[in-house]
Image (spheres, rainbow, N blue to C red):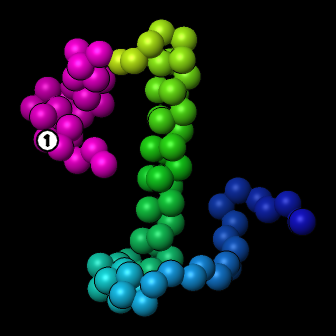
């Protein structure tokens, strides 16, 4: 496989359910499907990375407490947004 330079793009083929594609096209709008999917994949990779950090921490120190989770939310989202951020976690 030929190495790619940073910022280079590559075409791929992705299969997904038709109903999902229809909603994707509606939501992507002027941004375009490629940009929408790129943003979604970047977000998912970041969340996967955070999950790995948490898993490693918990393996060494035990499960995070509610207080530790709230402190992390406040640090990430600010005091006023910490409550709302907790509801968005899937």
Q: Quadrant of residue 2?
A: bottom right
Local secondary structure at mark 1: helix
Mark yes or no: residue 25 visible.
no
Q: Residue at x 50, y 77 (%)?
A: 34
Q: Is residue 68 left or right of residue 60?
A: left
Residue 7 % position (x, y): 65, 61
Q: Is residue 33 magenta?
A: no
Q: Residue at x 36, y 18 (%)?
A: 64
How far across and how far down the image is residue 59, in percent? 54, 17
Q: Which residue is mark 1?
A: 84
Q: Which quadrant does the N terminus fall into?
A: bottom right
Above or below: residue 47 compared with residue 2: above
- What secondary structure is the magenta-colored segment mainly? helix
Residue farthest to the top?
A: 61
- Is 55 left or right of 70, judged from the image as shown? right
Q: Which residues are magenta?
A: 65-90
* Residue drawn at the location 17% of the way across and 32% of the way down: 82
* Percent coordinates x, y for residue 48 in the rendering: 51, 43
**Residue at x 44% of width, y 62% of height:** 40
Q: How many marks?
A: 1
Q: Is residue 73 magenta?
A: yes
Circle 1: is it few (<14), some (14-19), or many (20+) Cα within 10 Å?
few
Q: On screen, 89 above or below 27?
A: above
- Left or right: 4, with 39 as reference point: right
Instruction: Report x, y in % for residue 61.
Output: 48, 9
Depicted 72 relative to depicted 8: above or below: above
Q: Residue furthest right?
A: 1
Please name whichever residue, 74 or 63, is drawn nearer the observer in this view of the structure. Answer: 63
Left or right, 19 with respect to 86, comes to right
Quarter occupied by residue 72: top left
Residue 7 visible within the image: yes
């Amino acid at each position: 496989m030929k190495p790619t330079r940073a910022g280079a793009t590559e075409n791929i083929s992705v299969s997904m359910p038709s109903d999902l594609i229809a909603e994707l096209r509606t939501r992507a709008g002027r941004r375009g499907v490629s940009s929408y999917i790129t943003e979604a994949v970047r977000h998912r990779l970041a969340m996967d990375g955070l999950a790995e950090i948490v898993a490693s921490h918990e393996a060494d120190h035990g499960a995070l407490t509610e207080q530790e989770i709230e402190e992390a939310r406040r640090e990430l989202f600010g005091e006023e947004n910490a409550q709302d951020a907790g509801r968005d976690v899937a």
